[in-house]
Image (cartoon, helix red, strand yellow):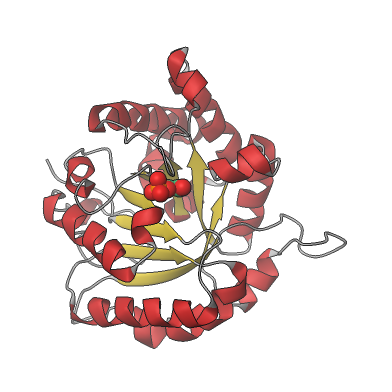
Amino acid sequence: MSRSRRAWIGTSWKMNKTRAEAVAYLAELREWSGTSSLDVDVAIFPPFTALATAAAQLTPARRAPSADRPGPSLHLGAQNMHWQANGAQTGEISVTMLLDCGVSIVELGHYERRQHYGETDYSVNLKASAAITAGLQTVICVGDSEQDRQYAVAPEVVARQVKVAARGIPSHALASVVLAYEPAWAIGTGGQQAEPAEVEAIHRVIRTALRQSHGPQGAERVRVVYGGSVDAASADRYATQTTVDGLFVGRSGLTATGLIGVIEEFCAAAPDAASELVFLEGSAHDSC
Ligand code: PEP
């Protein structure tokens, strides 16, 4: 079985790292990507305070593989944004500000933001629409809680999150959307890794929800990835699932070495891409 979408691996640093630490991390990542031939999208989500510094480390000349040498593409991401272009929103960041810092992808709807900062499916949708209209890629996080799992309602909970988040997004724009399935019970300290078969089942639910909202072609454009206590030792378990297009990692991506380990293990175990099926615009090479 071959993979039809380019692999995507992302990591959020959450509320970690100074600018100096960001520089050291990205120097190590850049050095690795300069020698690696893995054809994979790698997205790094530093805190807002390190974005401009990180962007300087990841200028296009430094981060893109050349036409004759395929390799990882490094993308700079932000961990959140407001949907308004500007205005009286103390403490918030707009899409214009993110673009000004060199950001190309924004993370929306992470469980921690839903749980502690009042993020809802509807605010995620407003943010996703604003981001995509402005030309940013998005990674939209969805996931069931421990209670949803106990009550066996995870499929409908996740399907609803997906449908609300993706509402109104044009079908062609779904190529710039990554959906990260991150069950609340699997992420962070004390999280329990989801079994690959469980991930596979929910990823199918996500794809079905997208088919219902955007038709089969639109649904095929979205990359669906898993996040929750993954490290280099476990990345291969998910890579062999054909519904898993990549991974989103937290703790194991806090060091460049840890992230590189996850990327290499995932890519080593992932089936090759069928190049004729790659829907991602601008993706010229086969996936890892
Ligand atoms: C996360 O919080 O999104 C996450 C995937 O964290 P971890 O990998 O540390 O479980």
Vertical side of 243 occupied by 152: above or below: above
Quadrant (top left/top right/bottom left/bottom right) for the N terminus: top left
Residue 151, percent across and down? 47, 12
Q: Is residue 168 visible?
A: no
Vertical side of 256 occupied by 160: above or below: above
Give the residue displayed 35% in from the left and 64% down from the top.
42
Q: Quadrant of residue 216?
A: top left
Residue 30, percent across and down? 31, 80
Give the residue displayed 43% in from the left and 66% down from the top.
44
Q: Nearer the viewer, residue 79 or 73?
A: 79
Give the residue displayed 44% in from the left and 32% down from the top.
185
Q: Is residue 37 visible?
A: yes
Q: Is residue 21 left or right of residue 38?
A: right
Residue 236, percent across and down? 17, 47
Q: Nearer the viewer, residue 242 or 34?
A: 34
Quadrant (top left/top right/bottom left/bottom right) for the C terminus: bottom left
Q: Quadrant of residue 24?
A: bottom left
Vertical side of 172 occupied by 44: above or below: below
Vertical side of 131 occupied by 70: above or below: below
